[in-house]
Image (cartoon, rainbow, N blue to C red):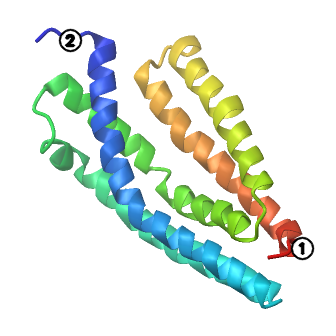
């Protein structure tokens, strides 16, 4: 089978993203629990308890994701070897898993923050954060890194944790401002 650089990078990315998503699933479940806790506590007129629940969940999610990040960074080659033996595809997959999982700590926190807004009934804030974070930041950054800086697929991979980190920081700042506590649940 003849591969071009783009198809090898795409194949490697597809393998990596499946692994990344598999390891994100438990953290996603924890962040959904945060949404429930926010809704319950705001419904009980306990906004401070809602905030503490979110911060505690974010802490545990960050710890979990930090451990998973270390596992994926250290064992990326071994894990990827179950999915492909093609050296070029394997190389891209390893790079993608290591680069993307380097931001897991932030993903763990960001997922909880975004879901806290949703749990409060504030769907506008996460929509705006994600719109700007992904469409107006991550995509242009991926293009810039891959073409202008000539990093190719590595630039695309780098844009993912950079954008996720920016989304997490933005979400955290807006969460701490506390306007979500004013939502009627």
Asked which quadrant contains residue 16, the reply is top left
In the displayed structure, would residue 48 be above or below residue 147?
below
Alpha carbon separation for disc pair 1 and 2 = 55 Å
Q: Is residue 65 visible?
A: yes
* Mark number displayed over residue 145: none
Element type at marker 2? loop
The residue sitting at 58% across, 12% down in the picture is: 148
The residue sitting at 44% across, 64% down in the picture is: 65
* Mark number displayed over residue 3: 2
Q: Are marks 1 and 2 in contact (CB under 8 Å)?
A: no
Could you tell whether 107 is left or right of 137 in the image? left
Per the image, the residue denoted by label 1 is: 182
The residue sitting at 78% across, 91% down in the picture is: 44
Q: Is residue 52 visible?
A: no
Foreground: disc 1 or disc 2 = 1
Residue 100 screen position, x and y as percent? 44, 44
């Amino acid at each position: 089978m003849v591969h071009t650089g783009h198809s090898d990078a795409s194949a490697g990315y597809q393998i990596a993203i499946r692994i990344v998503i598999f390891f994100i699933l438990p953290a996603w479940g924890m962040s959904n629990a945060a949404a429930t806790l926010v809704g319950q506590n705001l419904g009980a007129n306990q906004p401070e308890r809602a905030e503490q629940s979110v911060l505690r969940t974010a802490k545990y999610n960050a710890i979990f994701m930090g451990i998973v990040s270390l596992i994926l960074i250290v064992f990326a080659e071994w894990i990827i070897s179950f999915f492909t033996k093609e050296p070029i595809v394997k190389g891209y997959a390893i790079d993608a898993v290591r680069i993307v999982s380097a931001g897991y700590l932030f993903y763990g926190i960001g997922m909880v923050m975004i879901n806290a807004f949703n749990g409060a009934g504030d769907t506008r804030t996460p929509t705006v954060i994600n719109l700007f974070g992904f469409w107006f930041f991550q995509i242009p950054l991926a293009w810039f890194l891959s073409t202008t800086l000539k990093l190719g697929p590595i630039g695309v991979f780098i844009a993912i944790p950079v954008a996720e980190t920016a989304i997490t920081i933005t979400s955290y700042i807006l969460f701490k401002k506390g306007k979500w506590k004013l939502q009627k649940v």
